[in-house]
Amino acid sequence: MTRNTEVFVRAPAPWERSSAFSAGLVRGRGENTPDVKWTIKGCEFVHCNCAHDCPCQFNARPTNGQCHAVAGIDIETGYRGTTKLDGLKIAAVLSWPGAIHEGNGQIVPIVDERATPEQREALLRLMSGQDTDPGTTFFGVFSTTYEKVHDPIFAKIEFEVDAERRTARLKISAPVDARGEPIRNPVTGQAEEARIDLPHGFEDIVAEVGRGWARKSGTLALNLTAPIRI
């Protein structure tokens, strides 16, 4: 079972009131029993509250002591068993009081309202890491750090990503509104490029850096408007 990612990441300069985000291609494949196989391929957008280099990618502590994030995946093609997942979207709001590996985290899973009951069950199983061997996908890794899994939300998910232009937008009915754009030179206003390369990263393998803004109302309310990054 493998999970490879090509993720475009953006974060803010320290003088700007913004936060980091990532957007790019995500590929995952899992098989934990002979009769349960799954794969998804699509576009990923992740937005958290850390500085440009995302300390957790380098085994360091979160910039501000805790980690909060909004994430979304637009599934281009995928399936779990006989259940097709093509064209569906999923998202999540996540929060940890300290470093992710220390646990005590919370998650609000969000699933495309268009999903059938069978598709909802399949997507929630994948998001909770139930169909992956330990440590083989980021779904499985993160699931071991949750102290509380909130009731899932089934809602309309609007998701747009332009990896080449380093822009993204994630809007989920009422609870979530997030967007991202490139870092800009404070003198010229020109879009800048910055890249992180982690050949053995469990979450990102190639990531580019930018900035973003996000708000989440209701359960696990967030307002990511400080200079932060994933």
Image: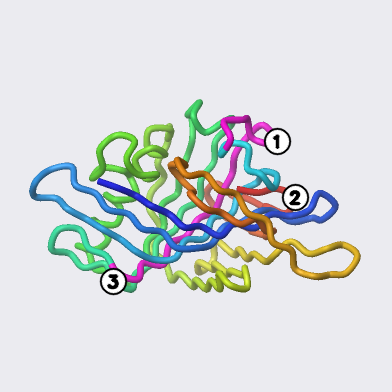
Identify residue for label 2: 226
Q: Which residue is mark 1?
A: 64
Q: Would you say the residues marked 1 and 2 are in contact, meaning their CB atoms lie under 8 Å apart? A: yes
Q: Can you give x and y, in whole percent of width and height, for residue 133 in the image? A: 25, 38
> Which numbered disc, 2 or 3, marks the residue that appears first in the sequence?
3
99 with respect to 118 (left or right): right
What coloring was used for the rendering?
rainbow
Distance between the Cα atoms at labels 1 and 2?
10 Å
Q: Residue at left 50%, top 55%?
A: 71
Magenta span covers which residues? 58-77
Q: Residue at image x 41%, y 59%? A: 26
Tell which residue pokes out farthest to the top in this image.
Answer: 102
The magenta stretch spans residue 131: no
Seen in the picture, residue 35 relative to 77 is either above or below; the reply is above
Q: Using residue 54 as the reference point, say whether residue 143 is left or right of it.
A: left
Characterize the local packing of mark 1: few (<14), some (14-19) or many (20 or more) Cα atoms within 10 angstroms.
few
Q: Is residue 76 above or below residue 204?
A: below
Task: Name which of mark 1 and mark 3 comes first in the sequence.
Answer: 1
Tell whether position 70 is magenta.
yes
Which residue is label 3 attached to? Answer: 86
Q: Secondary structure at mark 2?
A: loop
What amino acid type should be assigned to the residue bearing mark 2?
Answer: Ala
Pointer 2 local density, CA inside 10 Å: few below 14, some 14–19, many at least 20? many
Numbered-mark total: 3
Residue in the foreground of this view, choosing between 150 and 95:
95
